[in-house]
Amino acid sequence: MNQRIEHIESLENLVKSQTDNLSTIQTKSILEVIGILTFITNVEYTNLIKQSKKFDKDNFIVELTQFLTDDIHWKKISNKRKTEFEELKICYMNEEGRDFKMNEYIYMLEGIMRKSK
């Protein structure tokens, strides 16, 4: 399993296991970061890790989560990609009669990024 997926799963588990201990604002922030991570490619996540040398290794996930909570750039990218993904899901359902999966979308994005370099 890759680090991006592990990060998403650790945040999902935190929300599930700590529901009573998290404030509404904390829960909302964590869910927002899960949404951002969902639409970041594995390559982009790896680059974020490389760029985040300033983060404490013991608190890496916490610090990266906080960074993504405050970062407008990644919020805009994620919102754009979410809209694009939803539109592609509709196209795939109408034209091919099948569901378009998130992992297919991320794989497609990574392929496009490789080609554009």
Image (cartoon, grey):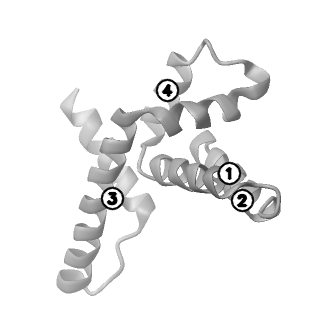
- Judging by the rendered image, the residue that carries numbered circle 3 is 82
Q: Earlier in the sequence, mark 4 or mark 1?
A: 1
Q: Earlier in the sequence, mark 4 or mark 3?
A: 4
Q: Are marks 1 and 2 in contact (CB under 8 Å)?
A: yes
Q: Earlier in the sequence, mark 4 or mark 2?
A: 2
Q: Dot 1: what SS? A: helix
Which numbered disc, 4 or 2, marks the residue closer to the eye? 2
- Judging by the rendered image, the residue that carries numbered circle 2 is 15
In this rendering, would 117 be left or right of 29? left
- Judging by the rendered image, the residue that carries numbered circle 4 is 48
Dot 4: within a 10 Å radius of its alpha carbon, few (fewer than 14), some, or many (20 or more) residues? few
**Three-letter residue code for mark 3:** Lys
Q: Residue at x 57, y 49 (%)?
A: 29
Residue 7 pos. (x, y %): 64, 45
- Judging by the rendered image, the residue that carries numbered circle 1 is 11
Q: Quadrant of residue 116?
A: top left
Q: Are marks 2 and 3 in contact (CB under 8 Å)?
A: no
Label at residue 24? none
Which numbered disc, 4 or 1, marks the residue closer to the eye? 1
In this rendering, would 104 be left or right of 10? left
**Three-letter residue code for mark 2:** Val
Q: Are marks 4 and 3 in contact (CB under 8 Å)?
A: no
Q: Is residue 22 above or below residue 41?
A: below
Q: Nearer the viewer, residue 104 or 37?
A: 37
